[in-house]
């Protein structure tokens, strides 16, 4: 598998580009109720990040995409240096991590549960960092976001204490770090959802661009932990996405990774 294949469900205005997906919205209010522990990832994070301000050490954030710099918007380093985490000789993929010391015991428990969950269904092993060069640094910044794939050296996974500490959110951001992105931009999405751009906040339409994705031979999954809920980026509390042909099917309400999320992960990393 080539390194360019790391982007399975790619968000925004690119095709296999080295973008960094973020669920850390710094926009107007999108949702009309506060987040609850078992709400969808997208619903919680839209509320969490309302009104947040990017800190001086955080990446450039435009909508829900983060960039290391303005110049990297159209870069594609994955095709030249690889964005997947490497597999060890024992067949496991070790992803070192560091967790900032500002989380409570309860919050740490939720984060650790999310990290450890991957060992139960894949060859991914999140391990405390010793002296590894490349690792993820989990900390509470402004919102919930992650770079997509292995960046090299330290890379932030932001899990804000103000609303991001839920199991599904932790898994979602870790999947970003492993190279995955959102479901609704899949190449086959028009067979499964109808996007209602007339209900989308002006300037946010690009979040629904369809991409020529590599889908790992798996079906579109309304229950994926990477699927936005139907009111994402709504300007009028009307749906921005509806499933087809049955508009009553629930979407974007996953509380944990689905079977298809797990299958894609294992196929990508050849577990």
Image (tube, rainbow, N blue to C red):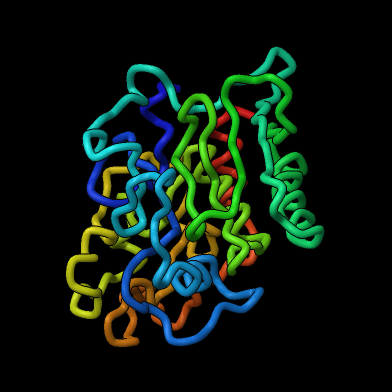
Q: Which residue: 49% across, 25% down?
A: 152
Task: Provide residue 99's location: percent of width, then percent of height.
Answer: 68, 43
Q: Which residue: 62% across, 61% down?
A: 168
Residue 166 at least partly seen? yes
Q: Which residue: 56% across, 78% down?
A: 35
The quadrant of the picture occupied by the N terminus is top left
**Along the viewing direction, whichever of 53 and 266 lies nearer the viewer:** 53
**Along the viewing direction, whichever of 95 and 267 lies nearer the viewer:** 95
- Find residue 86 and report its image quarter: top right
| Residue located farthest toward the top when viewing the structure as drawn | 89
- Find residue 255 and report its image quarter: bottom right
Task: Provide residue 180's location: percent of width, then percent of height.
Answer: 47, 43
Residue 251 at least partly seen? no
The quadrant of the picture occupied by the C terminus is top right
* In the displayed structure image, the side of residue 153 where residue 16 appears, left or right: left
Q: Is residue 200 above or below residue 9?
A: below
- Find residue 264 and report its image quarter: top right
Task: Provide residue 56's location: percent of width, then percent of height.
Answer: 40, 47
Q: Is residue 244 above or below residue 20?
A: below
Q: Which residue: 66% across, 74% down?
A: 37
* In the displayed structure image, the side of residue 256 where residue 205 appears, left or right: left
* In the displayed structure image, the side of residue 227 where residue 38 appears, left or right: right
Task: Provide residue 235's location: percent of width, then percent of height.
Answer: 27, 81
Q: Is residue 246 above or below residue 174?
A: below
**Along the viewing direction, whichever of 262 and 95 lies nearer the viewer:** 95
The total of numbered circles placed on residues is 0
């Amino acid at each position: 598998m080539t390194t360019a294949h790391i982007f399975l469900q790619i968000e925004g205005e690119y095709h296999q580009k080295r973008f960094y997906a973020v669920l850390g919205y710094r926009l107007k209010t999108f949702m009309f109720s506060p987040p609850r522990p078992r709400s969808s990832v997208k619903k919680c994070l839209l509320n969490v990040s309302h009104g947040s301000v990017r800190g001086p050490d955080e990446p450039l954030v435009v909508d829900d995409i983060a960039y290391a710099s303005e110049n990297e918007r159209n870069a594609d380093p994955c095709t030249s240096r690889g964005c997947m985490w490497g597999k060890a000789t024992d067949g496991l993929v070790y992803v070192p991590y560091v967790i900032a010391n500002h989380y409570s015991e309860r919050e740490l428990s939720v984060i650790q549960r999310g990290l450890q969950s991957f060992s139960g269904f894949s060859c991914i092993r999140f391990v405390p960092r010793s002296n590894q060069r490349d690792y993820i640094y989990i900390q509470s910044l402004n919102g919930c976001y992650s770079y997509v794939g292995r960046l090299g050296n330290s890379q932030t996974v932001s899990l804000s204490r103000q609303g991001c500490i839920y199991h599904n959110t932790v898994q979602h951001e870790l999947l970003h770090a492993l190279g995955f992105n959102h479901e609704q931009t899949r190449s086959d999405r028009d067979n499964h959802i109808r996007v209602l751009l007339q209900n989308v906040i002006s300037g946010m339409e690009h979040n629904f661009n369809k991409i020529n994705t590599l889908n790992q031979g798996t079906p579109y999954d309304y229950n994926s932990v990477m699927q936005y809920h139907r009111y994402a980026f709504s300007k009028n509390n009307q749906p921005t996405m509806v499933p087809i042909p049955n508009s009553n099917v629930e979407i974007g309400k996953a509380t944990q990774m689905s079977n298809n999320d797990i299958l894609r992960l294992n196929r990508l990393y050849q577990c």
